[in-house]
Image (cartoon, rainbow, N blue to C red):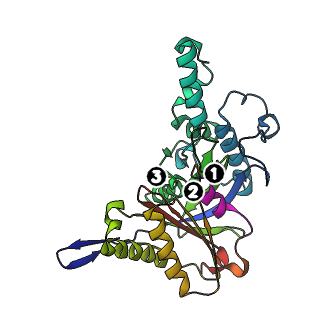
Amino acid sequence: MTATAGAMTVPVPVSVAESVVHGAAMVLPPDGTDPRAPWFDHRVRLGRGYKYLPPACQYLLAAARTALAASGEEAQRHAPELRGAVVGTNSAVAALHADIEGTVRREGAGALSPMGVPYFSVNLVAARLSTEHRLKGFNLTVTSPRVAGIEALHLAALELAAGRGAVALAGAAEAPDPRAGNAAPEAGAALLVLRPGGGPVPADGAVLRTVLRFLPPPALAAPQGRALAEDSVRQALDALCTAGPGPYEVELLADPSPVGDAAARALRAWCAGRAPVSTEHSGARAGALAPVARLAARPLPAAGGTRLAVVASRAGTVALASIHSHRHTN
């Protein structure tokens, strides 16, 4: 964004994090299936010993196995101390929290199951992923509303760029939130196997670029604040797409809020100067999975174009990500 000091407007630099995608996988309900209905069989996807894990943790482990296989077992080429994980979620253990609260109110703490209670800590979902695949370099869980999935990709890229690891699994995992209100429920997981940006891109790989911005909601009440906010989003889009050519596939996922409205106006203005651009505006989700699934989906845009995901939260955070095929990395 830009900061205003007196009569001057000072641009805040756009920090782009870049990584190379070596593999990706999604575990999602079949098309048309209610995410709250039974759709995943952990015995088929994972085998024995996973029965008591929260569903979101099961989804995450299944996605990790497929993503690592798709990467040619890239993680195994590096020491455990150079492998990391960053997982974003809003509702991975929301149902478990509700069950724990209900049990304590009805029967007392003594009635809680010792198998499920440890997962009261959402960090243990990603921790189980690290235990399973010996990811000892770093392990982070982020929970920022709506943007946590892209935030996880961004933080993983920063960790890799800082030399804290050579490979990372990053993405999102969700399970339906029983208290989500009117927001669309999410279930499943999407993971990308990432290596540091600027390195070699495999034949079926891609380049991922991410940006995080903050639009202070109170500032959007004034015309000048709205103008600065929209300019901030346009700057982020310009920075993301310096390496990613058209055509562009763009999806905006936004809460109905002044922040979402500002992001939508900025995106329309940015797209107006480019062709061809296909856009989609989705409503609020009760989680952070949808944008990561959008980025992980294959095939990538036709003719080696760029896929963009923009997520705006009513709290003010805007997360942007682009992915484009290796054919345009030279």
User: The C terminus appears in which quarter of the rendering?
Assistant: bottom right
- The label on residue 184 is 1
Q: Nearer the viewer, residue 273 or 128?
A: 273
Q: Nearer the viewer, mark 3 or mark 2?
A: 2
Kindly tell me whether residue 242 is visible in this rendering. Answer: no
- Which numbered disc flags the more N-terminal residue, 3 or 2? 3
Q: Is residue 247 above or below residue 13?
A: below
Q: Is residue 75 above or below residue 330?
A: above
Which element carries disc 2, helix, strand or loop?
A: loop
Q: How far from the left and from the top, in percent, is residue 73?
A: 70, 52
The amino acid on which the numbered mark 2 sits, given as a three-letter code, is Ala
Q: Is residue 287 left or right of residue 259?
A: right
What segment is highlighted magenta in the picture? 288-299
- Which numbered disc flags the more N-terminal residue, 1 or 3? 3
Which element carries disc 3, helix, strand or loop?
A: loop
Q: Nearer the viewer, residue 62 or 9?
A: 9
- The label on residue 284 is 2
Mark 3 crowdedness (10 Å alpha carbons): few <14, some 14-19, many ≥20: some
Which element carries disc 1, helix, strand or loop?
A: loop
How far apart are the alpha carbons under marks 2 and 1?
7 Å
Q: Is residue 34 above or below residue 308?
A: above
The answer to whether the residue labelled 2 contacts the one labelled 1, judged by CB atoms less than 8 Å apart, is yes
Residue 298 is a magenta residue: yes
The amino acid on which the numbered mark 3 sits, given as a three-letter code, is Arg
